[in-house]
Image (cartoon, helix red, strand yellow):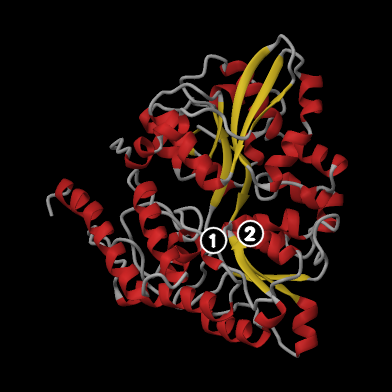
Amino acid sequence: MRTTLAAATAAVALALTGCAGAGAVGGGDGERIVVAIVSNPQMQDAISLQDEFRAAHPGVDVQFVSLPENEARAKITASVATGGGEFDVVMISNYETPMWAENGWIENLQPYIERTDGYDAEDFVPSVREALSSDGDMYSVPFYGESSFLAYRTDLFEQAGLEMPAKPTWDEVQDLAAELDAPEEDFSGICLRGLAGWGEVMAPMTAAMNTFGGGWFDEDWNATVDSPESRKGIEAYIETLRSSGQPGAATSGFGDCLTRFAQGQSAMWYDATSMVSAVEDPSSSTVAGKVGYVPAPVAETESAGWLYSWSLAIPSTSEHKDAAWDFVSWMTDKEYIKLVGEEIGWERVPPGSRLSTYEIPEYAKVSEAYADETLDAMNGATQESAMAKPVPYPGLQFVGIPEFQDLGTRVGQQMSAAIAGQITVDEAIAQSQRYAETVSETYRNEEGQ
């Protein structure tokens, strides 16, 4: 595996400017670890529960660096790839884990897992456990796992006399969004990510490209961003967003859509299944109990979901690996799931990581509307079901190669600009194809093509 660091080196300056957004937890004389995480709601819950961690591990002080997704990715990648050593625990995903394990950037966690009584790695959702492993050993452990599905307001559909198909197509989603769109009331028919970033707009857009029969590269590493099939997926996504999406869509990421949908400003939202922890929380969501969930929109494929996990890893440069594992194992253990449920609310439990979560009676009750849908989406997220043609890379909503952080970011900028109307869709696709061709040349040359 090559260690191309285009995205990482571009972000080194950011990583070394200090820990913006950091907050110390503890403050005693114990061993201090620095934990870099994404500032999603579930991660903020973990920060709020640190008194429980301190009680169990009084010798460990935790300092958090909590940042928005795009910034966190850049800072973490830069630090780990360059051996910066700023962090003892990092939040990464099934995109980074196999590559970073092969590069020797993160610790093999299997020995830690095997000597930790009751940790039970076999309880992790099998598809997630496999995605976070290299040669059978886990190199990161899941905080939560996700696929994607379509959330919709059951009450509004009933009032409008509309019925959500059990397995909606993109055409049907476009029609339903248009029916319910009311921009004069600051209400959108649908909310979709438009924010630039390989993990923002390009996640659902890549899934759309896949289900229309396209993708990033064909089996021979030819770039296919401008293929007729990929174009259909891109156009369907952007057209849906332009015609019936939220205002300011080009700056909307997961967090923005979550806020908008939870506050009753959109009729539908296609995104990660992890949304349920906030959407169904009655203390912060005005639509809790009024939402239905169906599979991700399809076109030519059987399914269109993705597989993703925010997970915790220990950089090989950490000088506090045992203390880091104390924290990692605490935040990903069965008991943490119960702690969140009892202290914050069962709706806020991190979903999709452990099978036993779905056997807890309290969680089973509150998750009745989405538990099966979440697990079905995760179990069905395979290339065989979500892609029309074989590809030479791992991943569904991403391309599992080192260059993708930079490539996906560049293409995401083009697509976001098209969503904003700054350039045409044709211009965005043409430039994106050129970016992809630069990457494809390297892989074709390697294989002697």
Left/right placement of residue 122 relative to residue 29 reads left
Instruction: Report the disc number at residue 14.
Output: none
* Residue at (24, 57) in percent of width and height: 221
Q: Secondary structure at mark 2?
A: helix
Which amino acid is tagged 2? Answer: Asp
Q: Secondary structure at mark 1?
A: helix
Q: Position of residue 89 (x, y in %)?
A: 57, 28
Instruction: Report the disc number at residue 256.
Output: 2
Q: Position of residue 311 (x, y in %)?
A: 58, 39
Q: Which residue is mark 1?
A: 251
Taking depth in this image into account, of 47 and 334 the one nearest to the observer is: 47
* Residue at (55, 74) in percent of width and height: 297
Q: Is residue 340 visible?
A: yes
Q: Position of residue 43 (x, y in %)?
A: 68, 41
Structural crowding at the residue carrying mark 2, measured as other residues with C-alpha within 10 Å and reported as few (<14), some (14–19) or many (≥20): some
Taking depth in this image into account, of 224 and 10 the one nearest to the observer is: 10
Decide: is 251 above or below 176. above
Taking depth in this image into account, of 441 and 248 the one nearest to the observer is: 248
Q: Is residue 375 visible?
A: no
Which amino acid is tagged 1? Answer: Thr
CB within 8 Å, label 2 to label 1 = yes
Which residue is the extreme one toward the bottom?
161
* Residue at (37, 59) in percent of width and height: 411
Structural crowding at the residue carrying mark 1, measured as other residues with C-alpha within 10 Å and reported as few (<14), some (14–19) or many (≥20): some
* Residue at (56, 82) in percent of width and height: 174
